Structures are given as structure tokens and as C-alpha cells.
Amino acid sequence: MWVANEDGDSLTAIDAATGAVVSTVSGIESPHNVQAAPDGSTVWAVSGDNDALVALDADTYELAGTSPTGAGPAHVVLTPDGDQVYVTNAEDDTLSVYDAASLKSRATVDLSAGPHGLRPTPDGSAVVIANTTAGTIDVVDTATHDLTATIPVGDSPAQVAVGADGRHAYVSLSGSSAVVKVDLAAQKVTGSTQVPAPPVQLYLSADGTRLLSADQGTEGAPGSTVSVIDPSSMTVEAIIPTGSGPHGVVIEPTGQRAWVTNLYDDTVSVLDLTTNETIATVPTGDKPNGISFSPQQPAPGPGATEISVPDYATETEGGHEGH
């Protein structure tokens, strides 16, 4: 597991088998989100302060490359084949598209206001983006980089999950403590359910039978649950206690365990989805946000590593390290 510690300016690598912290990589200013490549060889993060996309070598925990993003990068994802990297830029309402091998820019796409969380469709043909300010989701074709649909969904959408058939998307609405189901072909909301506190990230199990909602709440009124939702009926089947302010969530490929970042107590909760209970708590850095599962076994290495990321927010020219 890889965790982005936004206020800790670091990433935490955790052995998913044992729950032990393997390494901490510091020097990434305000990393809001992290994503392991499909093969686990590279780990991607965004630096919110430096307007940078960061690539780490998962074998060495060293910097593999960087590239400038738009203003205020929020989330990063890859296409399922690992070929393209996508970054939402919340402050200039754009999507940056990169070649994963070279980190070179392939396109910049204009989006609706406040793009935040995003996920690709399982076949990699499109990415679906939640726009917090606009109250919409955008759909972008990964081959042409064209914006193909903008769908109203509700108050402050934060993140999406996409079903295996690519037909339905699920969207967390932080403004109304709800999760909605969207028919992407019909371009309309077809179902919804309430959750205990304003949700942030969502994650759909590989078999499509369970949708997890991290019910973060706010700093003044933090949530402390993950809601387990049946995506077919959009009903809450279970509510699992977590730490304070659950933000990011990911399900292991087996479907038996989930991992949740707790924003307000600097930990990750490990959930047993066969019993719907928290079975372990792992300490992280300050304000853990995004979390990603890597299929690659954690490499032995130094307990702590520091890297240096260019500040593209102030530099007029940048370069790539290692590319």
C-alpha cells in the first residue's frame, strides 16, 4: 500500500501482508494523491505546492522523473494498460495527459469547474472526472482526449468509481452526504443513497458487488465510518467503524480486505470485509489522503528516503529527472 501524507510532505509504503511500514519517502510538497502503476513498478504522486507530477521507482524508492502539471494538481490515475497518466488540476479546471514512459505531455483538456477525483473505465477507453465546484462529472475519451459528456450529479462531487461494464459510474457527493449512481450512456443519475457523513473517496470491489464510501465528514464534525453499499440496489448493507476522518479507500484484489486513510488521526485502518470490522490500525505521516494498492511486493530498502522535486509553480522552465 502507498499512502500520500499531504501535510507530512511524504509517501508511506506499507507491506499489505504484515501491516508494517516499509519506507517513508519525503520531499514531495503536499501530495494529495498517489497511484501505483498497474504492474507496481512505478508509483505516481502529485505535488500540490509544486504543481508537479512525480514518478518513483518502487524498487529503489528513488525519484524516477517529474513533469509540470496545471495549477493545483489533485488526483493522478493511469489507464489500465499503464500507457497514459492523467492529472486533474483543480485550480485551472484542466486535465493533464502524459505518456507514462517519457512523462511528456500528450494533451491538456479543459474541464468543468473544480476537477478532483477521477478513474478510468475498466477497458481504458475513457476517464470519468468528478468536478466539485460544477456539480458534474466529465467523461474524456482516452484515444482522442475529447470531452464527450458532462453530466449533472449533485452537490460537491469528490470522487468516482466505474463499474466493470463501463456503463455505470458511482459518485460521492460531499455536499449532501450521499452517493449516487449514474448511467453514463443515458447521462443521468439513476439511484442514490445517504451515508452517515460527507463522503470523499469511493472504491468498487473487483467483482462489482460492493462499493465502499469513505465518510470523512469535516474537521469540525469528522466522520468515522466506511459505508458498504450494494451498487445494484444502492442500499447501505453495513457501516464499518474507522479512525477519524476516513478519506481514501482501496480494496485489495482478493476483495477480503480494504484499507482506509484517516485524515484527522494520521493512521490507516485495515478492514476485514468478510466480517465488516476494523482489524488493524497503521500509523502514517501527517494528514494521509490518497491510498493505492500495488501488486508488487515491497522492496527492501532504507526506512526513510528524501527526494527533491522541482517547483514548477514558480519555475518557467522544468525538466525530467531520469527520463
Image: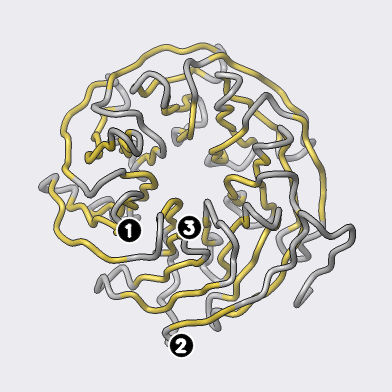
Secondary structure state at the residue bearing disc 3: loop
Q: Identify the residue position indicated by label 3 in the image.
A: 7
What amino acid is labelled 3 in the image?
Asp
* Front-lying residue, 211 or 309: 309
For residue 311, side relative to residue 18 (left or right): right
- Residue 165 drawn at (x, y percent): 48, 32
Q: Identify the residue position indicated by label 2 in the image.
A: 301
Q: Earlier in the sequence, mark 2 or mark 1?
A: 1
| Quarter residue 43 falls in | bottom right
Residues at discs 2 and 1 in contact (Cβ within 8 Å): no
Q: Is residue 213 visible to us here? A: no
What amino acid is labelled 2 in the image?
Gly
Q: Looking at the figure, which quarter contains the C terminus?
A: bottom right
Secondary structure state at the residue bearing disc 2: loop
Q: Looking at the figure, which quarter contains the N terminus?
A: bottom left
Q: Earlier in the sequence, mark 3 or mark 1?
A: 3
